Image: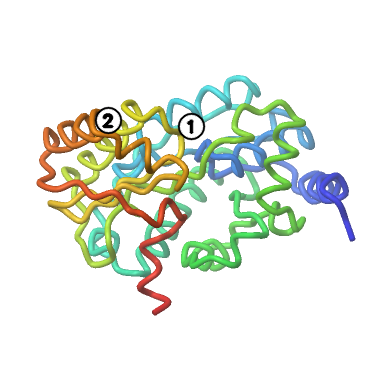
């Protein structure tokens, strides 16, 4: 059985055969490790980080992504990309992620080609195959490669290798795009996306949590957090601060999900 370091060597081999590459870079744990690994295998000159700046992208994520790219000395291009101009995305059906990724990757592929990068990469890892990820189909159709998956690196292994590499993102909580906060079938809007982003920022500030989701069932805000933190959030003074902050943003009701945070909870209905 190959251990994480053996898989890291395989990743380096895969990358070293590619020449100049562009990476679809979000600043999350996976794409950050992929960016660092590509830098180490190919040199900074042969790596280009590309980030789609969309209404679906939390503002804080863009700033953190740019900081790490600068630390690595990798050129980073942030490209304005209006996902809400695509009605297949706005409709927010279960295949939304496919249309979103297809549109973004198509744009990034053109920029990569213009910049002389022969291959576009993305940060899907070996664990992602077990989740509902229609965006993976878009990547495969467009020829966007996933070297972490090819090297069979799991999320836990990516985190361990990131820590060893000295990347600040090694323990960064997963943070899917803002569209994931809305039930399928709820049409996406600039106003709704801004509302739920502001809600999460407010609740994180009050509770001091890194891992949190506000699921937008407007006018209800449903809060998901680690089960161990639920009692703290329900303390009278804290609870009132959260309710006041979310009512100021337009929510009529605030619910605390007793099951706690779980990734992709809005996919549950797809499996029933």
The residue where tag 2 is placed is 238
At a point 81% along the width and 44% down the height, the residue shown is 12
Quarter of the image with the N terminus in it: bottom right
252 left or right, relative to 104: left
Badge nearest the viewer, 2 or 1: 2
The image shows residue 269 at horizontal and vertical percentages of: 35, 73
The image shows residue 114 at horizontal and vertical percentages of: 53, 42
At a point 53% along the width and 65% down the height, the residue shown is 131
The image shows residue 223 at horizontal and vertical percentages of: 31, 47
The residue where tag 1 is placed is 77
The image shows residue 101 at horizontal and vertical percentages of: 44, 57
Q: Residue 204, relative to residue 264: is it above or below?
A: above
At a point 29% along the width and 42% down the height, the residue shown is 55
172 left or right, relative to 57: right
Q: Nearer the viewer, residue 130 or 260?
A: 260
Q: Residues within 10 Å of mark 2 (few under 14, many from 20)?
A: some
Q: Residue furthest bottom?
A: 272
At a point 40% along the width and 60% down the height, the residue shown is 265
Q: CA distance from mark 2 to mark 1?
A: 40 Å
Tag 1, which secondary structure? strand
Instruction: Say which quarter of the image contains residue 193.
Output: top left
Instruction: Say which quarter of the image contains residue 24.
Output: top right
Q: Nearer the viewer, residue 255 or 247?
A: 255
115 left or right, relative to 5: left
């Amino acid at each position: 059985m190959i251990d994480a370091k053996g898989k890291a060597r395989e990743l380096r081999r895969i990358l070293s055969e590619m020449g100049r590459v562009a990476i679809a870079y979000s600043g999350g744990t996976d794409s950050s490790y992929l960016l660092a690994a590509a830098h180490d295998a190919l040199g900074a000159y042969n790596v280009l980080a590309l980030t789609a700046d969309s209404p679906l992208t939390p503002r804080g994520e863009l700033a953190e992504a740019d900081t790490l790219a600068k630390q690595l000395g990798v050129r980073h291009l942030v490209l304005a990309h209006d996902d809400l101009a695509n009605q297949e995305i706005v409709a927010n059906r279960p295949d939304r992620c496919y249309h979103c990724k297809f549109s973004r990757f198509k744009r990034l592929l053109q920029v990569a080609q213009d910049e002389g990068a022969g291959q576009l990469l993305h940060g899907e890892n070996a664990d992602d195959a077990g989740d509902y990820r229609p965006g993976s189909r878009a990547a495969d159709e467009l020829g966007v490669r996933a070297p972490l998956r090819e090297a069979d690196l799991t999320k836990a292994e990516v985190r361990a290798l990131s820590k060893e590499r000295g990347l600040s993102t090694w323990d960064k909580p997963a943070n899917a795009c803002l569209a994931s906060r809305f039930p399928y079938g709820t049409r996406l809007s600039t106003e709704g996306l801004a509302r739920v982003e502001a809600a999460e920022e407010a609740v994180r500030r009050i509770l001091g949590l890194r891992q949190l989701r506000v699921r937008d069932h407007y006018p209800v805000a449903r809060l998901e957090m680690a089960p161990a933190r639920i009692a703290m959030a329900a303390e009278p003074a804290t609870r009132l601060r959260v309710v006041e902050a979310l009512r100021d943003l337009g929510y009529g009701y605030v619910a605390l999900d007793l099951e706690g945070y779980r990734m992709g909870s809005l996919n549950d209905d797809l499996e029933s």
